Amino acid sequence: MIYRCLALFGILVLWSCNGSPTLPTDASEGVILLGSEAGEILVLYPQAPRSGGQVDRIPIPRYVDGFALSSDRSTLYFTAFNQLPDRKLHALDLRTLELVQSRSIAELLGTDQVQDIVDTGGEAIAPSHDGSTLFMAGWRSEQGELGIGLVDAETFQPKGFVGPLRVRRHGLATLPPTPERPSGAVLALGRRPQSTQSTLSLFVIDPRTGAIVDSLAGATADTSAYQLVPAADGRSVYLNGTRTLARYDFEARMLREVVELPTQGWLTLSRDGQELYRTDQKVNPTIPGTGKVFIFGPALERREPIDLSGHAQGGYPPVTLSAAASHDGKHLYVVTGTGSFGPAPPYQKGRLFVVRVADRHVVRVLELNSWNVGPPIVRP
């Protein structure tokens, strides 16, 4: 199931690390892969000629779930645990790979109720655009209502609550400032607990006050939508579903384009916002994808996909998990693989493909020797 797979896309606590990996002499850009079945963060320099495909491995808690990048991409916020109810909220400086803040969810909530701790932070996290506040889905208020908790991003002290509101997994996103929203906004995909409607709504939250300032009912007809990715201009948002991809226009207050897809997968945006990359994981738990990364323009116009089917593993095309663009946008880093067990094959150890975007040519393939490898994040 994509949710379990994506939950393992989490990342990494480095308190057990003896030292950060050293930068190669040619100063190639560094990429971290966030988590694996073994509990590790992988650090590599996939374009360094002299790296020899070397992968540095740093032990981390095995179970990592909710995560989000700060707007300047310098800090990674995440929740992680070895055993529940020991889930903690952490902040990782991606420039130094140092853990700069940590606090247990139990302390944040002021409770020892296991279910509350299980709910909180594992669904979704989003920082405000100015970096001052973290929005955490699944938070329970003192009255027992389920909603979104507001946490000071520097001190990790609770500072508010939005709700009641039930947010979908990966259903929080940060919107950049626009003339209409000078402080930006936080967007939530979900439903009011008392709602009898089957459709999902988009809730627009003012990051300064924590107030819901707009509610966009029926933003998507796909009730399986599970991921929000804002457009670069902040005027629309992409909704990724089990087999659909849609764009909602805030200015027109309407759903624009909708495209059908054969599989479920993970969605990422290019650095300039002019391309979207959607992986091709599985049709269902027993049927793998075709080894592609689908590519779309800003208005969801289809472009030539990246086809990795010629790099079969165990008789199956690579199962594409996640992708990220290089700093200059010329290359795409594509993570493939599966877990070491499941209801049906394929079972594929992780690989990292370096693909030249201009002609879809595979420049390099790195064997990761790990299962269920998390998504790539290019270090600042």
Image: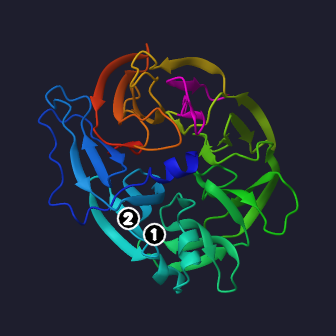
Nearest the viewer among 261 and 62 is: 62
Residue at figure coordinates x 57%, y 50% from the top left = 3
In the picture of the structure, the residue carrying the numbered disc 2 is 91
Point out residue 273 in the picture as x, y percentages from the top left corner: 54, 34
Tell me if residue 155 can be seen: no
In this rendering, position of residue 247 left or right of residue 378: right
Residue at figure coordinates x 14%, y 38% from the top left = 24
The disc at residue 248 is none
* Mark 1 or 2: the one toward you: 2
Residue at figure coordinates x 49%, y 20% from the top left = 306
Q: Which residues are magenta?
A: 273-299
Q: Is residue 114 above or below residue 175?
A: below
Q: Amino acid at mark 2?
A: Ala
Local SS, label 2: strand
Hey, which quadrant is residue 102 in on the image? bottom left
Point out residue 17 in the picture as x, y percentages from the top left corner: 20, 60
**What is the crowding at mark 1: few (fewer than 14 residues within 10 Å), some, or many (at least 20)?**
many
Nearest the viewer among 248 and 13 is: 13
- Label 1 and label 2: CA atoms lie apart by 9 Å
Q: Quadrant of the C terminus?
A: top left
Point out residue 161 in the picture as x, y percentages from the top left corner: 64, 76
Q: Is residue 258 above or below residue 248?
A: above
- Is tag 1's residue or tag 2's residue first in the polypeptide sequence? 2
In the picture of the structure, the residue carrying the numbered disc 1 is 153
Does the residue at mark 1 contact the one at mark 2 (Cβ under 8 Å)?
yes
Tell me if residue 8 can be seen: yes
Nearest the viewer among 204 and 66 is: 66
**What is the crowding at mark 2: few (fewer than 14 residues within 10 Å), some, or many (at least 20)?**
many
